[in-house]
Amino acid sequence: MRGIKRVAAKILQVDFARFLVSGGFNTLVTYGLYLLLLNVLSYRTSYTIAYVAGIVLAYSFNRYFVFKSHQGIKSVALFPLVYLAQYLTSLLILWVWVDKLGFDERVGPLLAILITVPLTFIFSKFLFLSRPKPEHPQE
């Protein structure tokens, strides 16, 4: 049993490392887009557009780089829901950061990322990797 736990911990670390790398790249791209859009749009609209672009990038990264697997239509259909939950949580954090606390709107998305990334990884892993089938004891 210890061996299984060690292997599982190692796999989690590797997947999480790839998740962080792809997420870091995705964050750079979408944060840059957000900053560009702030020149012409409100922070809410800028964040929404950048976020939708990030979902498309994240799905591609998770599918082909992080987990190198998927569960067919399940991962395609449910993946946007994971990011919808992350988006709503992030937007709430951003709203509190900017409107309630009066802090810089350029920094708020970074705080939201720090808070939401671990949960997003767990839910994404669930969507992309199939669970091993339980072993049946031999009779």
Image: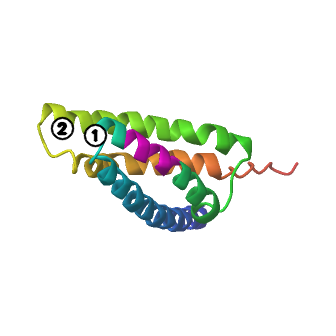
The residue that appears at 48% across and 43% down in the rendered structure is: 52
Q: Which of 13/83 is in front?
A: 83
The residue that appears at 61% across and 60% down in the rendered structure is: 67
Q: Mark 1 points at which residue?
A: 43
Q: Nearer the viewer, mark 1 or mark 2?
A: 1
Amino acid at circle 2:
Val
Q: Is residue 136 above or below residue 4?
A: above
Residue 133 drawn in magenta: no
Structural distance between the alpha carbons of marks 1 and 2: 9 Å
Q: Tell me the quarter of the image containing the N terminus.
A: bottom right
Find residue 29 and report its image quarter.
Answer: bottom left
Looking at the rendering, the stretch of residues picked out in magenta corresponds to: 47-55
Q: Horizontal and vertical percent for residue 42?
A: 28, 37
Q: Horizontal and vertical percent for residue 35?
A: 29, 53
Q: Name the residue under label 2.
A: 98
Neighbourhood count class around disc 1 (C-alpha, 10 Å): few under 14, some 14–19, many 20 upward: some
Q: SS class of the residue under badge 1?
A: helix
Neighbourhood count class around disc 2 (C-alpha, 10 Å): few under 14, some 14–19, many 20 upward: some
Amino acid at circle 1:
Tyr
Q: Which of 33/16 is in front?
A: 33
Say whether disc 1 or disc 2 marks the residue closer to the N-terminus: 1
